[in-house]
Image: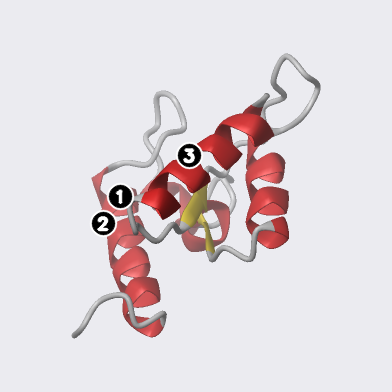
Amino acid sequence: LLWDNLLTIKRTLEQGGVRLIMLNYPRSDIDQCGQAPRDVIARFARAQSLPLLDIGKVLGPQLMGSNMRYYAKVDGHPNSDGYQRIALTLHERLVALGWLVQ
């Protein structure tokens, strides 16, 4: 289901001339189909030759210590420092792809 939805989104964006970069979230929850959405997104990006920004690699693992500075203590979502790091890394990637002019 997720794959089909991603394919529909990709086709719709392509029809409008919009380029697509995939981002996935560091959590590895399993969906109702028994798959981790982050893994489906990564496979989809590879299969469709789309750039992927792996948020888990950007922020590091959700472990106690230095990497926790990017995560909210309550629910494991990124905090303001985490979102800033994601935004800066995404900007760098878009510049590297030539999609943004510096």
Query: Considering depth in this image, is 29 or 15 the residue closer to the camera?
Result: 15
Query: In this figure, which colouring scheme has been used for the structure?
Result: secondary structure
Query: What amino acid is at disc 2?
Result: Gln
Question: Which residue is identified by label 1?
Answer: 83
**Residue 14 in the image: x percent, y percent?**
43, 54
User: Seen in the image, is 34 located left or right of residue 69?
Assistant: right
Which tag is nearer the camera, tag 3 or tag 1? 3
Question: Which residue is identified by label 2?
Answer: 84
Residue in the image at 59% along x and 51% along y? 61
Residue in the image at 39% along x and 83% along y? 96
Q: Compute the Cα span from label 1 to label 2.
A: 4 Å
User: Seen in the image, is 80 located left or right of residue 49?
Assistant: left
> From this viewpoint, which residue is outermost toward the left?
102
101 w.r.t. 43: above or below: below
**Residue 47 in the image: x percent, y percent?**
72, 58
Q: Compute the Cα span from label 2 to label 3.
A: 26 Å
Q: Compute the Cα span from label 3 to label 1.
A: 24 Å
The part of the image, by quadrant, that contains residue 64 is top right
Which tag is nearer the camera, tag 2 or tag 3? 3
Question: Which residue is identified by label 3?
Answer: 9
Query: What amino acid is at disc 1?
Result: Tyr
Mark 1 residue crowding within 10 angstroms, few (<14) / some (14–19) / many (20+)? some
Mark 2 or 3, nearer chain start: 3
Mark 2 residue crowding within 10 angstroms, few (<14) / some (14–19) / many (20+)? few
Mark 3 or 1, nearer chain start: 3
Query: What amino acid is at disc 3?
Result: Ile
Residue in the image at 40% along x and 74% along y? 93
> From this viewpoint, which residue is outermost toward the front?
15
Which image quadrant: the C terminus?
bottom left
Mark 1 in CB contact with mark 2 (< 8 angstroms): yes
Mark 2 in CB contact with mark 3 (< 8 angstroms): no
The part of the image, by quadrant, that contains residue 92 is bottom left
